[in-house]
Amino acid sequence: MQTFPFVIFFYGVLGSVAVEVLKILRVYQTGRDFPTRYSKWGFWVARSLLALIGGAVAAAYTLENPVVAIHVGASIPSIIETIAHTPPRETPRTTTGT
């Protein structure tokens, strides 16, 4: 059965959003004060973009399994952090015999 790319995109977004829902639920369960970041529009813009990136990456992988797409969406913050902190590899210099 073929899964359409927009469905996989949706599941990727859903996985990313689920991570934030879990964080909010933990705040409620611990009884701590609600973090101020949740009242700032900039946080929600950035978090929404991150969710969309999660959906786009899941769709780009051309996944067929919605569960895997949810996993990709949920892991996108870690994937981006890894990419951002990985130094670029140096390409070996080639010498020409002259």
Image (cartoon, helix red, strand yellow):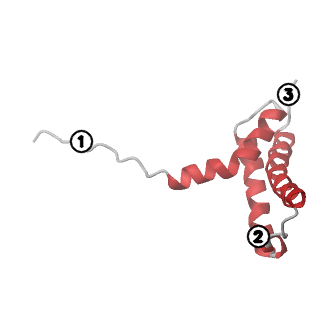
Amino acid type at mark 3:
Gln
Q: Quadrant of the N terminus?
A: top right
Q: Residue 96's x, y, as percent?
A: 17, 41
Q: Which numbered disc, 2 or 1, marks the residue that appears first in the sequence?
A: 2
Q: Residue 40's x, y, as percent?
A: 80, 76
Rendered residue at 43%/51% (across/down)? 88
Residue indicated by mark 1: 94
Front position in the image: 54 or 3: 54
Rendered residue at 48%/50% (across/down)? 86
Q: Which numbered disc, 3 or 2, marks the residue that appears first in the sequence?
A: 3
Apparent side of residue 37 relative to residue 86 in the rendered image (left or right): right
Q: Residue 74's x, y, as percent?
A: 76, 46
Residue indicated by mark 3: 2
Disc 2, SS: helix
Q: How crowded is mark 2: few (under 14 residues within 10 Å), some or many (20 or more)?
A: few
Q: Residue 73's x, y, as percent?
A: 76, 46
Between label 2 and label 1, give the one nearer the viewer: 2
Q: Quadrant of the C terminus?
A: top left
Residue at the front extreme, as displayed: 31
Task: Choose top left, top right, bottom left or bottom right for residue 43.
Answer: bottom right
Q: How crowded is mark 3: few (under 14 residues within 10 Å), some or many (20 or more)?
A: few
Rendered residue at 59%/53% (across/down)? 81
- Spatial separation of the CA atoms under disc 3 and disc 1: 46 Å
Amino acid type at mark 2:
Phe
Front position in the image: 33 or 5: 33
Disc 3, SS: loop
- Spatial separation of the CA atoms under disc 2 and disc 1: 46 Å
Against 70, residue 80 (above or below) is below
Against 50, residue 18 (above or below) is above
The dot on residue 78 is: none
Residue indicated by mark 2: 43
Q: Residues within 10 Å of mark 1 (few under 14, many from 20)?
A: few
